[in-house]
Every structure is written in C-alpha cells, then in structure tokens.
Image (tube, grey):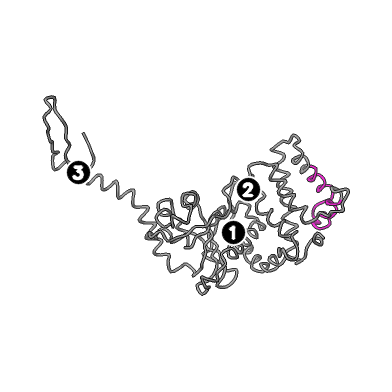
C-alpha cells in the first residue's frame, strides 16, 4: 500500500487490534527522492518563467499601462510611435494561469478570464510614461490610444489582431510578481472571428512607420466634435469579424461603408452608394459595388445564402472599407460632409 511521502499506515486486523507498520528505510528514501524529482520536474517551467521575468525587468519601458496583443507575430524588440508615450514591443515570456492568479489584484480583476488568453500574448502596446501624474492620469484616454494603434494595424492587414486585456505591469514580468498587486482591465470581448487567416501575419516595420506618420491624421479624422462618419466607419472596421455569423460580418462592414458614403436624401440608395464608393476607390467598378450591396441585402433580409461564396463577398467588402479608410487617412480628408 503506497501513500506517498508517509512512511507509516494504520490498519485494524481481524481481531480489532491496532497495528502500525513501518516501511523499510531504503524504500522510504527511494519514494521521497522519486516524489521530489516529480515535483521539481513540474515546477521547472514555472521557475524558469519567473527567472526570465526577472531578467527582463531592465528592458521594460517605464509605462503606465500594457495592452496585450494576440493574433500577430512580432520579429522586432520594440518600436516607438510617440517618444516616451506609446510603443509596441515583442513579448517573449507570457504568463500562465498560476502566475496570473499569483500576481492579480483579486478584488479588482477577472483573473480567470485573463488567464484564458495570457499565454497566447505575442506583443504589448505600452502607454504613458513614468512622469505621468497618477492623480491626473486618464486611463480611458490611454486605452483609446491603444485602440487607435490596434485599428490602424488592422487597416494595414493584421486581420486577426485581438486585444483582450490591459495590465498595470508588463506581460513579460508578471511571472515574477507574487504580491497580488497587478490590476487587469478587460478590453475586447472574447469572440470567435468569422475569418481567421491560416497564417498569423507579421507586423511589418514599414506598416509601423506608416502608422507613425499618419497617427495624428487618423486621430483628427475621428474627432466626433467635427464628424461621426469616419469614427463610426473605423470602429466597424475593427469589430467587423468579431462574430461567428457571416450575415453580421457583412452588415458590420456595410455600416462602415454607409457611414462614409450615405446621404439622407438618396432615393436610389444602391445606385448612389455605388457611384460614390467607385469614385472614391478607383480600383473598384460601380457594378462590383452594386453586386456587393445586393449581397448585403441578402444578409439583412434573411435570404438564402451559400456560406462558402459569402465568405468571398465578405472579403471583397472588407477590402472596400479598408481602402476607403486608408485613402481618407493618407489624403487627410473625409469622403463627404457630415450629417446635418
């Protein structure tokens, strides 16, 4: 009878007498050594992750928030968008569930939800600087900057980008924190994306340079005090594939397109939209836009659809919206005036 590290066991014999049997000392030593080896083997990955986290401390920028990024590959160490304020860096030591539970402020964080995704984090967006006054810091504004970064990455082709959580410490060093001091913030709602590339795309340095050059242009265009059109279209560009339903996916894309090109006075809506979109995106014909609008109508009116063909229409519609938004940003102008 083997009961682990205990060297004795108690039993009653048929006469009801209590007996204590002690294992041979050599057997005990063997059992203890074997059990310790098993424990060490199981603890080794956790200990190695903690040690690596401590080694990475010196490489972490002095930021206030760290947004975890999934669905991308990162080959560089760090790229700065705005000096001492916002950057993106590669994550080489993402924490698992044990480290998340040990680091998390349990009263302020949904640590079990965080641990579902934490080991998959490939990069982090760093926000704020050490000199930023804690009392005056607006976390909502910082997170809006992170979203702005993520949606621009999506515009440049990172279709599967997903940012489920932010943390008060870098994701690279959370494994070394054991005082329950880390606060996690929920961002993107967990979802299954309608179209996921078979190969996760690399973030290209040329795309990051484009984002750096066009950062403020895109920010000005989405200023809701001036116009809601661009901001709404950009929002749906980000969330269009956060669904399992192809009908919802194509409707999300058309919300963006109609925000950019719709006019209240239009009577022949399909004709008017097709004309404006094809005039703006010169690589797409008016007839092609009409065809895609009809597929939008199929989705919204509950008509029968072939899902395999419909995925193709979704991709073509996504390209329309993406090219429209890229032109707005690069030319620093809106498609049409805002609603009156």
Which secondary structure class fits the magenta region best? helix
Helix, strand or loop at label 1? It is loop
- How many angstroms separate mark 1 from mark 3 (CA)? 52 Å
Q: Position of residue 293 (x, y in %)?
A: 79, 45
Magenta-drawn stretch contains 178? no
Please tell me whether residue 63 is drawn above or below residue 25 in the rendered image.
below
Q: Nearer the viewer, mark 2 or mark 1?
A: 2
Left or right for 158, reference 37: right
Q: Which residue is mark 1?
A: 203
Task: Categorize mark 2 by other alpha carbons within 10 Å: few (<14), some (14-19), many (20+).
Answer: many
Left or right for 180, reference 227: left
Closest to the observer: 222 or 306? Answer: 222
Q: Check the image and name the residue furthest to the right.
A: 267
Q: Nearer the viewer, mark 3 or mark 2?
A: 2
Q: Which residue is mark 3?
A: 30
Helix, strand or loop at label 2? It is loop
- How many angstroms separate mark 2 from mark 1 (CA)? 20 Å
Q: Position of residue 34 (x, y in %)?
A: 24, 44
Image quadrant where residue 156 sits: bottom right
Task: Categorize mark 1 by other alpha carbons within 10 Å: few (<14), some (14-19), many (20+).
Answer: some
């Amino acid at each position: 009878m083997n009961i682990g590290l205990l060297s004795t066991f108690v039993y009653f014999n048929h006469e009801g007498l209590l007996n204590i049997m002690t294992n041979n000392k050599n057997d005990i030593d063997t059992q203890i050594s074997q059990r310790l080896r098993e424990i060490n083997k199981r603890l080794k990955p956790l200990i190695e992750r903690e040690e690596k986290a401590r080694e990475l401390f010196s490489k972490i920028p002095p930021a206030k928030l760290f947004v975890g990024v999934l669905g991308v590959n990162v080959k560089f160490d760090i790229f700065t968008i705005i000096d001492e304020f916002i950057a993106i860096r590669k994550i080489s030591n993402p924490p698992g569930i044990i480290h998340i539970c040990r680091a998390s402020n349990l009263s302020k964080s949904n640590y079990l939800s965080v641990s579902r995704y934490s080991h998959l984090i490939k990069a982090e967006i760093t926000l704020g600087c050490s000199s930023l006054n804690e009392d005056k810091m607006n976390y909502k504004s910082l997170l809006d900057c992170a979203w702005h970064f993520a949606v621009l990455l999506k515009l440049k082709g990172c279709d599967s980008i997903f940012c489920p959580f932010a943390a008060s410490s870098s994701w690279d060093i959370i494994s070394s924190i054991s005082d329950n001091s880390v606060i996690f913030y929920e961002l993107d709602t967990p979802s299954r994306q309608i179209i996921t590339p078979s190969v996760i795309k690399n973030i290209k340095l040329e795309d990051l340079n484009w984002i750096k050059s066009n950062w403020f242009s895109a920010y000005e265009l989405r200023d809701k005090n001036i116009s809601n059109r661009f901001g709404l279209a950009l929002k749906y560009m980000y969330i269009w594939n956060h669904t399992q339903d192809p009908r919802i996916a194509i409707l999300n894309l058309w919300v963006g397109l109609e925000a950019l090109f719709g006019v209240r006075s239009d009577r022949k809506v399909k004709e008017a939209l097709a004309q404006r979109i094809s005039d703006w995106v010169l690589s797409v014909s008016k007839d092609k836009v009409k065809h895609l609008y009809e597929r939008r109508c199929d989705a919204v009116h509950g008509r029968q659809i072939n899902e395999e063909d419909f995925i193709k229409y979704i991709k073509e519609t996504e390209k329309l919206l993406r090219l429209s938004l890229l032109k707005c940003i690069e030319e620093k102008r809106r498609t049409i005036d805002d609603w009156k």
